[in-house]
Image: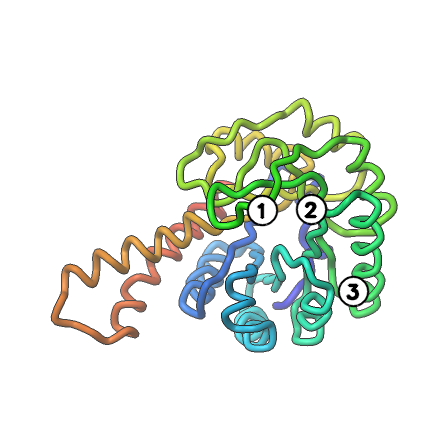
Amino acid sequence: MLVTLNEILPDAANSNYAIPCCNVFGYEEGRAIVDAAETLKKPIILAANKDMVDFMGVEALGKMLVSLATSSSAKVCVHLDHTYEENIVFNAMHHGFSSVMFDGSQLPLEENIRRTNNVVQVAHALGVSVEGEIGSVAYKEGRDHIKSIKTTPEDARRYAEESGLDAMAVAIGNVHRLTTPDSIIDYELLESIADKVNDIPLVIHGTTGIKEADILKLKQTRVAKFNIGTSLRMAMGENLRRLMNEEPHKFDKMYFMQKAMPFVQAEAERIIRLLN
């Protein structure tokens, strides 16, 4: 069942659970993640990041991910992750994405508000939800131009009130693409932000780099969405390498992908259980 963020995040923000947003790097991972959601009867968000958009384009991605969502018994949101260009965001809406993230985190506040609001006006007219980011969540590797700037409560208040967005990603010590849980979460800052933005569900990126104890604590706050990519890629990549090394005479891609998919599903189920 295809849904938007607005259909699954508000209740999570007001409760003690959260929804995982899983970056998808191919049909096999998408299928395994949706199977996990169906097994546990929980909602899930399938996200396409910039690397996949550059590789496949939003039309092909939309067809693949929306087909997984519409044929599923679980509630599945199809979400465009960090995107800096409005034309790509609008194209994704046209090709079935039920949710988009316009990332203006590297822009001055006024410009971030203005451009996010422009996206919101189009998205809401089409029944699509919008996520934005205030402050800037840095990357351990891969995108050195992305700044590391903690979210300020007053900027968060203005961004929430003036942009009209549906979910807000914040920078409170979290970091993208960490392979070990090294992030130090600033809970005092998070509380101040939550007090300022009222009803807007908050989003944490870089979940793989956060300790489980912190995740359990964070999900009891206004944080309603956790983005996960690295641990799922590790589950696929590490097991695929092991399986191929165990059977070097085999060469069929489908044979190995089908054997690796249960490990991705198991990781997705672990994440869903952790957040619920």
Q: Which residue is mark 2?
A: 106
Badge 1 crowding class, 10 Å Cα cut-off, few under 14, some 14 to 19, many 20 or more, is: few
Estimate the x, y position of residue 83 in percent, counting from the top left: 65, 59
Visible in this render: residue 184?
Answer: yes
* Real-space CA distance between mark 2 and mark 3, rounded to the nearest whole angstrom: 21 Å
Tally of numbered discs: 3
**Mark 2: which secondary structure?**
loop
Lower position in the chain sequence, tag 2 or tag 3 = 2
Sequence-wise first label, 1 or 3: 3
Rendered image coloring scheme: rainbow
Q: Which residue is mark 1?
A: 145
Q: Nearer the viewer, residue 275 or 244?
A: 244
Q: Amino acid at mark 2?
A: Gln
Percent x, y of residue 181: 44, 34
Does residue 132 sit above or below 76 in this rendering? above
Query: Quadrant of the rendered structure where residue 155 is?
Result: top right
Q: How far is disc 1 from disc 2 in space, using C-alphas?
A: 9 Å
Label placed on residue 123: 3
Q: Considering only vertical position in the picture, is 202 above or below 193?
A: below
Say left or right for 190 vs 200: left
- What residue appears at the point 53 percent right and 33 percent down from the top-left corner? 216
| Structural distance between the alpha carbons of marks 1 and 3 | 28 Å
Establish if 159 lies above or below 210.
below
Kindly check if marks 1 and 2 are in contact, taking CB atoms under 8 A apart as contact: yes
| SS for dot 1 | loop
The amino acid marked with disc number 3 is Ala
Which residue extends farthest top? 188
The residue shown at (79%, 70%) is 126
The image quarter in which residue 86 lies: bottom right
